[in-house]
Amino acid sequence: MSRLTDDLNDPQREAVSYGTGPLLVLAGAGSGKTRVLTYRVAYLLANDRARDTEITAVTFTNKAALEMRERVETLLGEPLRGGFVGTFHRWALEILRRDPQAAGLPRRFVIADSDEQRQMIKRELKKLGLDPKEHPPRTLLGRISGLVNRGTGQAAFAARAADSQSELLARVWEGYEARKRAAGAVDFDDMLVLARDVLRDHAEIRSRVQTRARWLLVDEFQDTNALQMDLLEIVLSGDRNLTAVGDEDQSIYRWRGAEMDNILAFERHFPGAAVVKLEENYRSTAPILATAGALIAANQRRRGKTLFTNREGGDDVRLYVGSDERAEARWVADRFQELQRRTPLGGMAVLVRTNAQTRSFEEEFTSRHIAHRVIGGLRFWQRAEVKDALAYLRLVVRSDDTIAFERVVNVPTRGIGAATIDILRACADRDGTTMVEAARKLPDELSPRARISLERFFQILDEAREQRTELDPGDLVGWLLEAAGLLAMYDGDDEEKTARRENLQQLAAAVAEAAGRGQDLEAFLDAISLLEEHDEDSSPDAVSLMTLHAAKGLEFDVVVLAGFEDGLLPHSNSRDEPESLEEERRLAYVGMTRSRRWLAMTLARTRFLFGTRLPTRPSRFLEELPADCYTDVSDSPLTGSPAVFGPGAPAAADRAPRPRPAGRPAKKVAATAIDESGQGWRPGDRVRHGRFGTGVVLACQGSGPRLKLVVFFDRAGRKTLVPTIAKLDRL
């Protein structure tokens, strides 16, 4: 007993030895929450307060559950027999496996994995005559999952569907549920729903589960959703011995359905609860904690805690402002090569808000032979939407590229399926030509629809070759993305589509940058092909590139938060909504607190966004940080208020690629012009329009009542509008 408690600080000891009833442990970043959880289980067992069979500990990942069990068994010096340690879904599955008939399931029901779920959705779309390319199954499943985890069932959703998109989702969802029933299958969300319903409706089963969960411990409590809370409250209607461990400042999964109110209003859910705060940080240096603490203090919706460390010293937090994203990547590479003398590359990470941001770092690290790997996602050039666009470009450069032709002849879907490809392949073999040449002849064996589709496909490519002589390479990519329908494939506001559009826009940026270095389109494609030959470094001694969401729960000696700009962090999707902005601030806080001893925030004065080079705005979060929280090590440091990079932004925006619909002539616009009308419009402003959605101002033309704004809208493309008539809202 003394060995267990001697290893703890006072608040940790208070939490571990707490008696009966609900307990909330507010565990700040790096404060030892895992230690508290594992020591509490060991303490309960070693003190004979609980038997093995009365312990249930739930968390969110299998890895975390395995580590928790192993640590408990190490502390006890013997196996944990009978107790449950696992994820919410594993816990629900155990309930259902024991009593499947209570849930209306067959005895040997199956679990549909993510691929099987997508296939069911895809089959249902085809049954309804809908195109899976236009309605990605992954996106539909994400929407369904979000609704289920917020407590909404299919029937209830269908009853209140008030628009075409909701009605479409309701129909697909209904068919998806029918397919699961016919297959005797459940998905991950079903497990939680059915387990909750079984416990609510069957007293005998509920009593048995409550006995096994007499002592219930929940990790990452800030990430629980409405459905999981229903499950917990049903089980806790018995002894109410709940130990919940979490940190509202690290709640970053609202888009998945996580309800931060579960932790903010813990005492309302569980009256009489005690609260213990863990504020001593064992991970980061004092300068890092001071910066992170100053940032998160701006959030209103938090219980409040102040992290501190007893470690002395520590490097200053750095701020670097580069001229563009390539300068940003060069500075980071320089620092990593310097730091490599005392820190392995495996202890370094670049954290970004969006996957598209990794491109400039991947290229810079590759050119310098700095080992790196993209965590939680494909390398930029391996992403499907990027490879599709590259295939179109290859066909513009080399019209008989059969591999590229096969990849994109039906992207977006245009009715050219496997049967058509087989016919073209047979015609090519018969005539001794390439498949592309055979397709251009529009063989009689093809269906009328396939002939029309192929004719239009080749028209786009032929027009692109003509445009190649008229447009800058970056402008050509923008034109092709729209003309081929690649951008339109990802219309919509959901996270996945937004990320794919951003990746395509980054491709336009890459081509324009290469052109600026004197590299034509053919040379660019060759360079990318060579770049792809570098396999991802399998060595653990490699820099990690990942999104801030993927970094949750990890830690590194050296961390760079890249793209510290408005529109990236906070992301433009936050749209000045207080809840969304607070979550973005928590995301930045999570990134900062991943670092043990060296932290930098970086940004660029101009960046390729929405297919064009634009002056940026430093993140509004910088304004919330006291000046003594960081050291500006830029060649041209920020001075005064960092709210806006002024009109002196590099004139590269004048030469930037600008996506245009097919047939629209190229037109140069002075993107660095500043509105002098007194209305205060600037290039880079984010705006919202009632019809076109959200967009970014590329340029201001004229002044006073003649002022016009050139705006690139995420969904509608490039528009020229009079702001007073168009009723634009500034975001």
Image: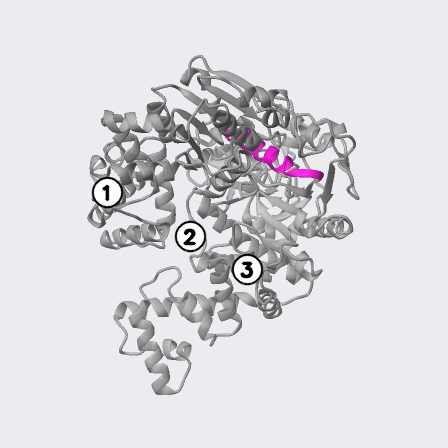
| Viewer-closest of 673 and 67 | 67
Where disc 1 sits, the SS reads: helix
- Residue positioned 62% across, 26% down in the render: 8
Q: Is residue 59 above or below residue 469?
A: above
- Lower sequence index among marks 2 and 1: 1
Q: Is residue 363 above or below residue 167?
A: below
Most extreme residue toward the top, as rendered?
Answer: 272
Q: Main secondary structure of the magenta part?
A: helix
Where disc 3 sits, the SS reads: helix
Gap in angstroms between the C-alphas marked 2 and 1: 27 Å
Percent position (x, y) of residue 379?
55, 56
| Viewer-closest of 134 and 50 | 50
Specify few, some or many for label 1: CA neighbours under 10 Å numbering under 14, 14-19, or 20 or more: some
Percent position (x, y) of residue 287?
73, 31
- Lower sequence index among marks 1 and 3: 1
Percent position (x, y) of residue 213?
38, 27
Question: Magenta residues, as a range?
Answer: 577-598
On whether residue 328 falls in the magenta region, the answer is no
| Viewer-closest of 355 and 63 | 63
Q: Which residue is mark 1?
A: 174
Q: Nearer the viewer, mark 2 or mark 3?
A: 3
Q: Which residue is mark 2?
A: 488
Label 1 is placed on what type of residue? Glu
Gap in angstroms between the C-alphas marked 2 and 3: 20 Å
